Image (tube, rainbow, N blue to C red):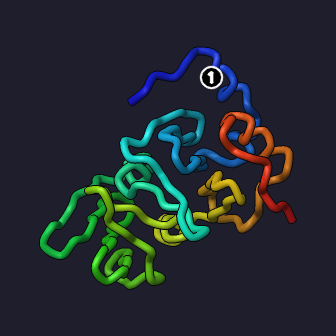
Amino acid sequence: KSSVTADELERIYNNDAFETLGKNAMVFYPGSSKVYFGEKVEYFSSLPFQTDEKIYAPIRGCAELFGYEVSWNGTDKSVLLSGEKNIVCNVNSGETTVNNENSKNGDVIFTGGVTYAELNTFADIFGLSAFSDSSGLAMLLEADGKKPSAETINSIIALYPEASLGFEID
């Protein structure tokens, strides 16, 4: 994990946008290991990426931030998440099971020794709302169905110099 500068921490904690998003908000950008979770900055050990207009993030990195224990079943190529819910993400079938019930057909892939899930798959299994912009900036937010305001988004984008202002706001 990389260290966070004092200036960056000050900007984050003084950023009202994260309070607006809620304590379980997760914000990340493909190609960057930096992830904002609640009022903390964390770093993924494997980078999120974007392809075919889909954003993928490492299952282990996201799940551990939400307090889940993560294990790999190499026999059937599935990731097991144990916590508030019991979740199985199967790479071969693409199925995601939450508490022994099939969830929506998840978009789960295995590449470079890491298992990734698509942004909407995370939203589905963790009961969150997913938002992204054309540059790939991704957000997982509490599931109230509301998109963040333009002011909130712009405030968060300012924390990512590599992101554009491409969010579409209703």
Q: Residue at x 37, y 83 (%)?
A: 101
Judge from the rendering whether residue 47 lies leftward or rightward of residue 23; answer left or right. left
Judge from the rendering whether residue 141 lies leftward or rightward of residue 108; answer left or right. right
Judge from the rendering whether residue 93 lies leftward or rightward of residue 104; answer left or right. left
Crowding at dot 1, Cα within 10 Å, few <14 / some 14-19 / many 20+, comes out as few
User: Residue 143 location in percent, x, y?
Assistant: 64, 64
- Quadrant the N terminus occupies: top left
- Residue situated furthest left in the rendering: 75
Query: Toward the viewer: 65 or 4?
Result: 4
Residue 137 to residue 73: above or below: above
Residue 121 to residue 81: above or below: below
State the count of labels.
1
Q: Secondary structure at mark 1?
A: helix
Judge from the rendering whether residue 86 lies leftward or rightward of residue 34; answer left or right. left
Q: Residue at x 57, y 70 (%)?
A: 52
User: Residue 106 location in percent, x, y?
Assistant: 44, 77
- Residue situated furthest top in the rendering: 6
User: Residue 67 location in percent, x, y?
Assistant: 39, 49
Q: Amino acid at mark 1?
A: Glu
Q: Residue at x 31, y 61 (%)?
A: 81
- Quadrant the C terminus occupies: bottom right
The residue beneath circle 1 is 8
